[in-house]
Image: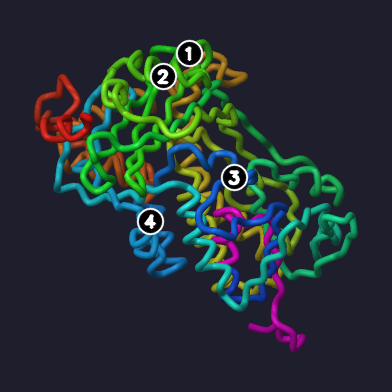
Amino acid sequence: MSDSTTARPYRAVVIGAGAAGLFAAAALAEFAEVTVVERDRLPRHGPQARRGVPQARHAHLVWSGGVAAFDELLPGVVDEAVLRGARLVHIMRDMVSRAPNEVWFRRFTSVCHHSLVCSRPLLDAVVGARVLNDPRITLREGITALRLEGTSATVTGLRVGGVGGEEETLPADLVVDASGRGSRAPHWLRELGLPDVPEREVDAGVRYATRLFKAPGGTTSVVFPLVNVQANPAKPPGQAGIIVPVEDGQWIVTLSGSRGGEPRDESGQFVDFALGLDDPLIGELLRDAEPIGDVVTSRSTANQRRYYEKARDWPDGFVVTGDAIARYNPVYGHGLTVAAQCALALRDTLRAHRITAPGTARRVQRAAARPVGAAWDLAVGQDIFYPGAGDKPPTLAEKLLARYVDRCVATAAGNPRALDALLDVMSLSRPPTRLFSPDMLWPMLVGRGRPRLTAAPLRDEERKRARP
């Protein structure tokens, strides 16, 4: 598409070649020639973790809302990932999960949700290969974004630096900051003379420890369920764990704990920590499993949001997306889904408004705030109850909402219609108002559902399969 006043095509620059940047580039390629600038060098020889993706070694899943967004942006990319070893997990048939309120979910087969699971390097390799093979998209590696060019009214490009210290300006009709947790957008906006945007942080003080295991007893990702024991914020320190069977007959096992109950990076204590969870199932499954490599830890788990959509003034030609807007406690698994949904918000806005039209960037920012806000409310609605998580205690409204969500979870654990409603919200497929639909309210009020499970619904044949 070309501007009516010039023969040249639109030009867009995306900062960051992580998931959010790749999705943004895919969305922008419909409208512009896209340059992606990346500080790192991307892996050349198959899936590999890299420094610029600090959470890459921990367990990941893509909720069904994200799976749908992936395929809308990049048709067939989910099938490509599955062909390379990823797995579409049916929730709850292929999942053994205990909720924060210590309720075990029944493994209903009638529920209509799937999650995509694999190692993060595999997912990045599949998405990267698809996006960066687009002739409209150019990748420039070893490039550092230095500052925005332009004025407080209009951004006209990005100043960048190379490995040797040389600098240049990349002219752009739209600059998209998808640089993630290390985003310098607040500083850049101040340099242009714009006021600070509102921010909020809720930090439950969670630490993660992850170790890779060979799937015991010859189990594979095809036949063994995900196993998830979630933390209970009402019983600090909140400790949790998840086993994610992934490609190559391996399990990614991530354990977590909040202040005073953090897992350590000592290999000899990893299984003992899992055995000490409120339910020892994960530890029991790992007791005879063979580890691969050392324990990897992370403390970068705080929820932090910048409310760019509320900024009094916003420059044309600049958009922030993905983790650069908000980052979440990774336990909720929403980062990848939000990144893809933000890219859809970008694409849909540009289909209705020219890139260079006044106010287009602000419209994109406000559209991106919807998936960001949905994930934020889900994460903060749990984490705010950990001691010391925020500078203010939970409000009465937050307490009442958390109590209602607990009732939703308890109802969904025994009723498939209610579970579908809960997963619609948890997967970011539907807005939170879905929790007040008849599918949830009717079984909640009349109590129709199966009795609560007293133990994990892991089948006998699955337990046997997990033994060496």
Residues at circles 2 and 1 in contact by the CB criterion of under 8 Å? yes
User: Which residue is drawn at the image coordinates 43% and 18% (left, top)?
Assistant: 238
The kind of residue tagged 3 is: Val
Where residue 180 sits in the image (x, y, percent)? 63, 46
Q: Which residue is mark 1?
A: 261
Q: Earlier in the sequence, mark 3 or mark 1?
A: 3
**Region of the chain picked out in magenta, as a range:** 1-27
Q: Which residue is mark 2?
A: 239
**Residue 160, quarter of picture:** bottom right
The kind of residue tagged 1 is: Gly
Residue 367 is inside the magenta segment: no
Helix, strand or loop at disc 3? loop
Helix, strand or loop at disc 1? loop
Query: On the picture, is 346 further left or further right than 161?
Result: left
Please tell me which residue lies in front, 295 or 107.
295
Where residue 325 sits in the image (x, y, percent)? 62, 45
Q: Earlier in the sequence, mark 2 or mark 1?
A: 2
Q: Which residue is mark 4?
A: 67
Q: Earlier in the sequence, mark 4 or mark 1?
A: 4
Q: Earlier in the sequence, mark 4 or mark 2?
A: 4
Q: Is residue 55 visible?
A: yes
Q: Earlier in the sequence, mark 4 or mark 3?
A: 3
Q: Give the quarter of the figure containing the N terminus.
A: bottom right
Q: How far apart, in angstroms, are the residues tagged by discs 2 and 1?
A: 7 Å
Q: Which residue is mark 3?
A: 53
